Image: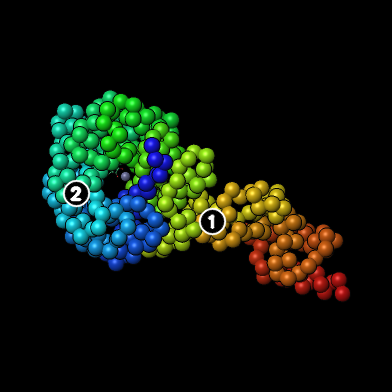
Amino acid sequence: MDNKIFIFDTTLRDGEQVPGCKLNKKEKIELALELESLGVDILEAGFPISSPGDFEAVHEIAKLLKETTVCGLSRAVQKDIEVAAEALRPAERRRIHTGIGTSDYHIRSKFNSTREDILQRAVQCVKWARNYTDDVEFYAEDAGRTDNEYLARVVESVIAAGATTVNIPDTTGYCLPHQYGEKIAYLINNVPNIHKAVLSCHCHNDLGLATANSIAGIIAGARQIECTINGLGERAGNTSLEEVVMIIKQHGHLGFYTEINAMQLNPMSRKVSETMRMPVQPNKAIVGANAFSHSSGIHQDGFLKDTQTYEIIAPEEVGAESSKIVLTARSGRSALAYRFQKLGHQFNRNDIDILYPLFLDVADTKKEVYDEDLQILAESHKMVSI
Ligand code: KIV
Ligand code: ZN
């Protein structure tokens, strides 16, 4: 089995569903072009039947992207599929993503239906989509809570009907990593025609497990991850693209790779955050403002001796600004000497011993000690020492 992990970006679809993150056509096009240059394999550009504006945006993106496959979402409804196909018509590479809920919650409460009927509808929507493209992805919504035996029957049937990718969404973010991995392994071991399709992980973050579940999914045999920049997405969000890409890179022993240009991860995160007007939490892995900041004395001392003591990724690897030594009341002497040195003050150990308690007095009154505070301390120390 090839170990390339296909990155399916859904920032412009699942990410854009976040309240307040709605994009206009121009913004969607700009982000789509950036995502293509980031190296995403498949870009879910929108849900064409949902609004004329979204149809237009998907249609324009379909005209512009050359390398990346452009994908449009639809329900298992003939009209949705026709509209998605029309929106995607100009694309160099196009994919229709269609599907239906397969858990008993969806079958009974949402559709007031039966497992047999849903199975027929699943097969039917794939057949409709295959009239327009050979690249059809089927999603079994709420697969995370779907009975594995029934799910295997659905997966086998949609592959027989022509699905080339089968998405196994943990729509409610319910699964534990080992359960999600076992679900993928179950499908690989129990669906006779599974070799004809790629299995895809689409995990939501309701319990903070979206990234862990996606990684468990690929370890078990899935070869596509659906994810978003900054982990944006419905409710608590989707799997974060930057996290899975860097996990795969850091853990090379797993044998996986992606085609994402990691050096663009931080600029891409900023671009999405600005365009969607959605701030990134400072402690967000890979792209948060504090991802490469060190503030406690013990960490700062170790980091200044050898960066790898406290950093597993070099910031330049992911296009972030260089690591920061932040001064707070928890910082130590090495960090203080380092920051004075950065400002051009070469103090010896004695000087630092004198300056350190003065620094702590300042630090106790504020959240962070800045360069201007250090300059005042340095100048007054020099005056006293003359
Ligand atoms: O979370 C989900 O199940 C989805 C599907 C529409 C793929 O977003
Ligand atoms: Zn989703």
Residue 215: % across, % down = 44, 39
Residue at image location 12% in from the left, 49% down from the top: 79
Q: Which residue is the site of mark 1?
A: 317
Residue at image location 66% in from the left, 68% down from the top: 371
Which structural element holds mark 2? loop
Residue 69: % across, % down = 29, 53
Image quadrant for the N terminus? top left
- 197 or 22: nearer the viewer: 197
Query: Image check: 221 left or right of 148?
Result: right
Image quadrant for the C terminus? bottom right
Which structural element holds mark 1? helix
Residue 270: % across, % down = 45, 61
The quadrant of the rendered image in which ligand 2 is seen is top left
The answer to whether the residue bearing label 1 lies less than 8 angstroms from the nearest atom of ligand 2 is: no
Residue at image location 46% in from the left, 62% down from the top: 267
Query: Image check: 309 left or right of 219?
Result: right
Residue 1 visible in the displayed image: yes
Q: Which residue is the site of mark 2?
A: 133
Task: Give, as a three-letter code, the residue at label 1.
Answer: Glu
Task: Give, as a three-letter code, the residue at label 2.
Answer: Thr
Mark 2 crowd level (few <14, some 14–19, many ≥20, 10 Å Cα): some
Q: Do the residues labelled 1 and 2 touch (CB within 8 Å)?
A: no
Residue 183: % across, % down = 35, 30
Residue at image location 69% in from the left, 52% down from the top: 306
